[in-house]
């Protein structure tokens, strides 16, 4: 798997505020850095707790994350100076050795019945993962300014560049007041809005099932749990340049509606 970003919904409210939803794939270990962005950002990711032990091990064995180049240690959080070619070969061998050790330990934990919510954590440094991220234009500009930089973690920089390129290539849909931004679907029919919520939730499982029987069951489970973060990606445009009922400027979230806030 390579790092990539695809725009799956792109909208502009009546005041010209843009909201964009991406499906992203990236090395899992940078999730903590992505999560430092809170204002104007909603996200859901594939969960280590949602993938079976054997499936997760096969995914890592077939396509592990291996750094292309290692940078030298030094002061501060980053260093743009790379190891020499010979040093990089040694670092690569050590990393791959750690991967094999983790895979063996993972299999042993499975053999004695340890749950995936623990055993799969051993493989996270070597995993790629998939996520959904929705941002308003102001949050996205902030991400680009910080992460498309030689001082950024190289893997986050690669993701930010992929998001920027997808964003610049996308033509946003002009919404009227109270029209909806609906990831994965082109209209705001209630069935497709429910499918959209479930699609954002099912990123955890790497599977998507849009049969309405499945959609109704998963949707009801999300409401009753409650597990409402997938509802943050569906948004209603408002005629404003102020923050709406959630985290976005110029848009109200469907989560806000579900939780009884203004919409």
Image (tube, grey):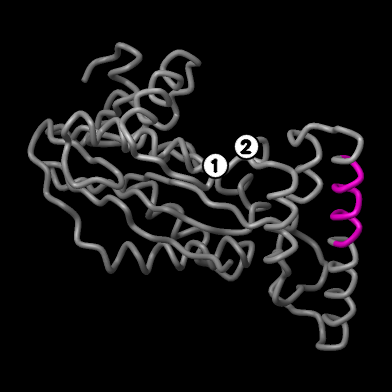
Depth order, front residue of 38/179:
179
| Marks 2 & 1, CB-CB < 8 Å contact | yes
Q: Residue at x 30, y 47 (%)?
A: 184
Could you say whether the residue bearing mark 1 is in a helix, strand or loop? helix
Tell me where the magenta segment starts and ends, as one range: 100-109
The secondary structure that dominates the magenta segment is helix
8 or 217: which is nearer to us?
Answer: 217
| CA distance separating discs 2 and 1 | 6 Å
Left or right, 190 with respect to 4, comes to left
| Circle on res. 50 | 2
Query: Residue 163's quadrant in the figure?
Result: bottom left
Q: Residue at x 56, y 43 (%)?
A: 46
Q: Which mark is residue 215?
A: none
What numbered label is drawn on residue 205? Answer: 1
Which mark is first along the chain, 1 or 2?
2
Furthest-left residue in this view: 176
Which residue appears at 39% of the width and 46% of the height?
Answer: 139
Residue 44 left/right relative to 217 = right
Residues packed near mark 2 inside 10 Å, few (<14), some (14 to 19) or many (20 plus): some
Tell me what residue is drawn at x 54 percent, y 68 percent. 158
Q: In which quarter of the image is residue 199?
A: top left
Q: Residue furthest bottom?
A: 85
Quadrant showing the N terminus: bottom right
Q: Residue 179, how many percent across, how many down?
A: 13, 35
In x, y percent, where is residue 71?
A: 76, 73
Magenta highlight on residue 10: no
Q: Residue 180, how many percent across, how many down?
A: 18, 36
Disc 2 is placed on an element classified as loop
Residue 212 located left or right of residue 240? right
């Amino acid at each position: 798997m390579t790092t990539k970003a695809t725009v799956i919904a792109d909208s502009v409210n009546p005041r010209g505020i843009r909201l964009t939803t991406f499906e992203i794939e990236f090395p899992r270990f940078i999730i903590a850095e992505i999560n430092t962005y809170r204002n104007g950002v909603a996200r859901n990711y594939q969960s280590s707790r949602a993938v079976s032990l054997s499936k997760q091990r096969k995914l890592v064995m077939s396509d592990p994350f291996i750094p292309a180049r290692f940078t030298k240690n030094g002061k501060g959080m980053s260093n743009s100076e790379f190891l020499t070619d010979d040093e990089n070969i040694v670092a690569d061998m050590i990393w791959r050795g750690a991967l094999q050790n983790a895979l063996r330990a993972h299999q042993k934990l499975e053999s004695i019945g340890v749950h995936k919510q623990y055993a799969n954590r051993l493989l996270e440094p070597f995993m790629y993962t998939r996520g959904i991220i929705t941002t308003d234009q102001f949050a996205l500009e902030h991400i680009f300014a910080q992460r498309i930089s030689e001082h950024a973690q190289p893997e986050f920089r690669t993701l930010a560049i992929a998001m920027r390129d997808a964003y610049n290539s996308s033509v946003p849909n002009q919404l009227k007041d109270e029209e909806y931004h609906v990831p994965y679907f082109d209209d705001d029919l209630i069935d497709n809005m429910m499918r959209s919520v479930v699609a954002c939730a099912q990123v955890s499982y790497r599977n998507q099932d849009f049969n309405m029987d499945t959609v109704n069951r998963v949707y009801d489970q999300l409401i009753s749990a409650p597990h409402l973060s997938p509802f943050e990606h569906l948004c209603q445009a408002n005629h404003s340049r102020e923050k709406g009922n959630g985290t976005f400027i110029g848009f109200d979230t469907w989560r806000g509606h579900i939780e009884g806030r203004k919409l």
